Amino acid sequence: MAKGSIYIYTGDGRGKSPAAMGRAVQAAAEGKQVMIIQFLKGKGLGDSDFVRRMEPEIKLFHFEKSDENFASLTEEKQQEEIGNIKNGMNFAKKVLTTGECDLLILDEVLGVLENGIISADELKMLLECREDTSIILTGVKLVDEICVLADEVSRIETVKFKVWE
């Protein structure tokens, strides 16, 4: 029986990924191993010296090759990236089945679901592989089939937004 918890950060507000990153830092401070797989974000945090300094406790992966966000790509480039995203999902399954980390963050995986790249059933099967690993899912749109599996769901909404200068 799976013991790892499932946490979801969802909503149209800003801060879902930073909230997940905060949990990653907290887990690493407790001596746990953390892996983050980013989807649909172009480069995301991939080139960040800060994130690299957190290794080996926190490891960041992204499988997409384009530096641009998925939505801004041509149809042809999106098809290429879909294969890369599915490779990322397969890597997540390997991580969960081998128990390589204590916390796995699937950043923007709900967007992967929303874009039809994977189905809710595929995501549910992935989550069932978790054993002792806890998982954080992020994304704007949450579907009921995934929501019912979560131990905790946080809805993030923007009340006021002003760009930092």
Image: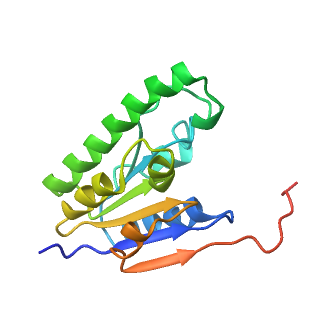
Q: Where is residue 46 in the image (x, y as percent from the top left)?
A: 51, 38
Going by the picture, which residue comes out furthest to the left?
1
Figure quadrant of the C terminus: bottom right
> Is the residue 39 above or below the residue 87 in the image?
below
Q: Position of residue 97 (x, y in %)?
A: 15, 54
Query: Can you see residue 42?
Result: yes
Going by the picture, which residue comes out furthest to the bottom?
151
- 100 left or right of 36? left
- 94 left or right of 42? left
Figure quadrant of the N terminus: bottom left
| Residue drawn 79% across the image and 75% down it | 159
Going by the picture, which residue comes out furthest to the top?
76
| Residue drawn 37% across the image and 46% down it | 118
Q: Position of residue 140 (x, y in %)?
A: 58, 60
Numbered circles on residues, count:
0
Residue 162 vs residue 12, the one in the foreground: 12
Residue 143 vs residue 127, the one in the foreground: 143
Specify the color scheme.
Answer: rainbow
Query: Can you see residue 26?
Result: no
| Residue drawn 36% across the image and 50% down it | 119
Give residue 96's quadrant in the image: bottom left
Q: Where is residue 154 in the image (x, y as percent from the top left)?
A: 53, 77
| Residue drawn 40% across the image and 65% down it | 136
Residue 45 vs residue 106, the one in the foreground: 106
- 36 left or right of 19? left
